């Protein structure tokens, strides 16, 4: 039963990834692309966590945590750049 829920969650995450990728490619402004990139990283984190649950390996959760921190910092840096730097 738990495996089926993981597969359903993975399918939903896959659809969400495709939709976010579409927004990333077609975003009319840079801000739309930054938000879409952030959504893509969150969905990727979801995939890593689902793999960790499926494989019963806790090390993947550490990888997901580091990836989340780096993604957060990356989005902050790009947002600062788009804002115009230090003011």
Image (tube, rainbow, N blue to C red):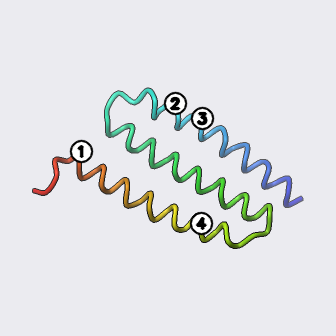
Query: What numbered label is drawn on residue 39?
Result: none
Residue 80 against residue 16 in the figure, above or below? below
Q: Position of residue 84 (x, y in %)?
A: 16, 47
Residue furthest right as drawn: 1
- Identify the element where label 2 is drawn: helix
Categorize mark 2 by other alpha carbons within 10 Å: few (<14), some (14-19), many (20+): few
Q: Give the image quarter of residue 69.
A: bottom left
| Mark 4 vs mark 2, CA separation in Å | 26 Å
- Identify the element where label 4 is drawn: helix
Categorize mark 1 by other alpha carbons within 10 Å: few (<14), some (14-19), many (20+): few
Compare marks 1 and 3 and give the one earlier in the sequence. Answer: 3
Query: What numbered label is drawn on residue 82?
Result: 1
Compare marks 3 and 4 and give the one earlier in the sequence. Answer: 3
Quadrant for the C terminus in the image: bottom left
Q: Residue at the spot x=73%, y=50% of the render?
A: 9
Q: Position of residue 74 (x, y in %)?
A: 37, 55
Horizontal relation, residue 73 to residue 17: left or right: left
Q: Nearer the viewer, residue 12 or 77?
A: 77
| Mark 3 vs mark 4, CA separation in Å | 23 Å
| Mark 1 vs mark 2, CA separation in Å | 21 Å
Query: What numbered label is drawn on residue 18?
Result: 3
Quadrant for the N terminus in the image: bottom right
């Amino acid at each position: 039963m738990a495996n089926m829920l993981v597969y359903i969650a993975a399918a939903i995450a896959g659809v969400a990834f495709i939709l976010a990728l579409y927004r990333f490619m077609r975003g009319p402004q840079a801000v739309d692309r930054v938000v879409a990139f952030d959504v893509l990283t969150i969905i990727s984190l979801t995939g890593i966590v689902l793999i960790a649950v499926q494989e019963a390996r806790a090390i993947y959760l550490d990888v997901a945590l580091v990836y989340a921190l780096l993604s957060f910092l990356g989005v902050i840096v790009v947002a600062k750049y788009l804002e115009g730097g230090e003011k």
